[in-house]
Image (cartoon, grey):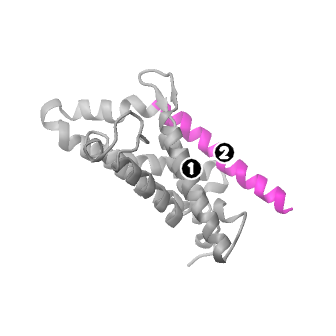
Amino acid sequence: MSIAATRIVLAEAFGAKEGTALRLKQAALVVAGIAALAIAAKIRVPMWPVPVTMQTFAVLTIGAAFGLRLGLVTLLGYLALGAAGAAVFTGSSAGLAYMTGPTGGYLLGFAVAAGLMGILARRGWDRSFGGMVGAMLLGNATIYAFGLAWMSYLFAADKGMAWVLQYGMGNFLAGDALKLALAALVLPAAWKLVGRARG
């Protein structure tokens, strides 16, 4: 395994490193991450053609900051709360019926994309603007791959693939570009702060 593949992620750069204190820190990060995901899902920024939520921004930055395992635990906890009926998603609905509706593929994609972001962060992609842009592109592509596949299954036969692509991806690309730029600035800036604190 290369040196680049063994880099720490942002969550490991501060606080406890081992033992009970580490477990408590990880538990606190998971709870904070789930809360951040729920809050981000409710933030709606007016934009054309559809309002922008900060949900995917939170998913991908948490994945990068927490790493593969902790990021996945956080996303699975978030999805489990939604499955249990907690109003943690973008709309007011939740539960298993909601999760098997049109957004179901995207929700599954969130967990996979967060894991991918954690893997890329281990390789240092989150430490530079260019690397984070690349990671965010791959993360977003992963979410869309799962989301569009499920949307196609539900709607392509009746509405056609052009409709699926427009309403499942096209309407959100402008907002995704803004969130990508924001994340590409935030994570490398956080690493610079860590470097200064250590210095």
- From the top left corner, tell me how far across and down residue 164 is, in percent: 26, 34
Residue 178 lies in the magenta-colored region: yes
Label 1 sits on what residue type? Thr
The answer to whether residue 75 is visible is: yes
Viewer-nearest residue: 160 or 43: 43
Viewer-nearest residue: 99 or 132: 99
Q: Earlier in the sequence, mark 1 or mark 2?
A: 1
- From the top left corner, tell me how far across and down residue 196 is, in percent: 83, 56
State the residue position of label 2. 186
Q: Which residues are magenta?
A: 174-199
Q: Secondary structure at mark 1?
A: helix
- From the top left corner, tell me how far across and down residue 140 is, in percent: 44, 46
Disc 2 crowd, CA 10 A, few/some/many (<14, 14-19, 20+): some
Q: Residue at x 44, y 56 (%)?
A: 77
In the rendered view, does 25 fall on the left or right side of 95?
A: right
Q: Main secondary structure of the magenta part?
A: helix
State the residue position of label 1. 61
Q: Are marks 1 and 2 in contact (CB under 8 Å)?
A: yes
Label 2 sits on what residue type? Val
Q: How far is mark 1 from mark 2, CA to CA? A: 9 Å
Disc 1 crowd, CA 10 A, few/some/many (<14, 14-19, 20+): many
